[in-house]
Amino acid sequence: MYKKKLPVELDCGLHLFMEVMNGKWKISLIWSIHCGIRRPGELHRKISKASRRLLDTQLNQLVSHGIVSKTSFDQKPLKVEYSLTPLGQTLIPIIELTAHWGEANRSVLEPLFLNEQYA
Amino acid sequence: MYKKKLPVELDCGLHLFMEVMNGKWKISLIWSIHCGIRRPGELHRKISKASRRLLDTQLNQLVSHGIVSKTSFDQKPLKVEYSLTPLGQTLIPIIELTAHWGEANRSVLEPLFLNEQYA
DNA sequence: TCAAGTAGGGCTAAATTCAGCCGTATCTAC
DNA sequence: GTAGATACGGCTGAATTTAGCCCTACTTGA
């Protein structure tokens, strides 16, 4: 278990948004769940570049942030389904707009992220 | 100089957006520049919680990503001004919408980020 | 029984970002 | 000339996130 040592910046609303979306695969997870992929195994097959371990971790964070809800069916083969909460659903139009921005400027942005160097 | 070793995810437009906004103070920088605070020293006084060093680094990244342009005036006291590029200006309505989402849900989100634990 | 599928977590190290110190210039003003 | 302002970057270690290993427990089907 890891506890944050530096304070989180919450002064402006955008930081709240970024804090929720912060995590390499959370966007993909939210979008996939929105598209009807609800089970952990399915999500892993869809987002196969991420480890199963990390997907579970980020799903748990989304649950604790109230974006996604988790339902465990008390069956014998043990089944779990995720779905968006009402709060999570309010993210969808924002994600759409933002993704649209990225696509519209892909030709400009994409070359910049290849072979990038940081100081 | 640091070179990325793991591939950047660029499949969806939202990841492009997140890649641009990725950096603890970039949102504040973009917004402050939009509000007319153009000089490095002024920005540092406005965002005094961040070190001057880090602000410079993130400003350079924003410049290299085509979001912000940097103008050096060839005067004697040496003066620098930043401003948003046309691409950077297209981010403003998105930032406004996203910040609005954060504010609207602040009462729900804020308690979750205090004393947070990670696995 | 053995393989494969379901779901989940402990643990460690790599990768990346952030914080903060120090040093370089030039100019203004006292 | 000493202090303070402008602007910039090298460097180091802390903080945080990500990757990838292994293990549990149950069920289905061959």
Image (tube, coloured by chain):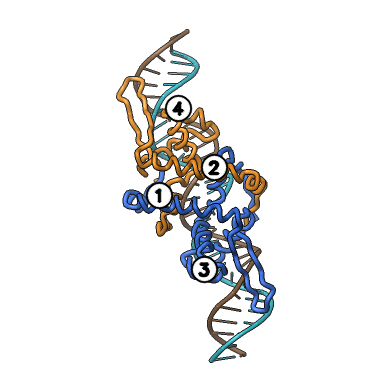
Chain colours: A blue, B orange, C brown, D cyan
Amino acid found under the numbered disc labelled 2: His
Up-down relation of residue D5 to residue A66 (above or below) = above
Q: Residues within 10 Å of mark 1 (few under 14, many from 20)?
A: some
Residue that sits furthest to the left in the current view: B74
Q: Secondary structure at mark 2?
A: helix
- N-terminal of the pair, mark 4 or mark 2, is 4
Dividing the picture into quarters, in which one does residue B37 lie? top left
Residue A44 circle label:
3
Which circle, 1 or 4, is nearer the viewer? 1
Q: Viewer-nearest of labels 1 and 3?
A: 1
For badge 3, the amino acid type reads His
- Secondary structure under tag 3 reads helix
Can you see residue A62?
Answer: no
Image vertical order of residue A16 relative to residue C11, above or below: above
Q: Earlier in the sequence, mark 1 or mark 3?
A: 3
Mark yes or no: residue A13 visible. yes
Q: Which residue is mark 4?
A: B41
Q: Amino acid at mark 1?
A: Trp
- The residue shown at (62%, 44%) is B106
Q: Which mark is residue B100?
A: 2
Q: Which residue is mark 1?
A: A101
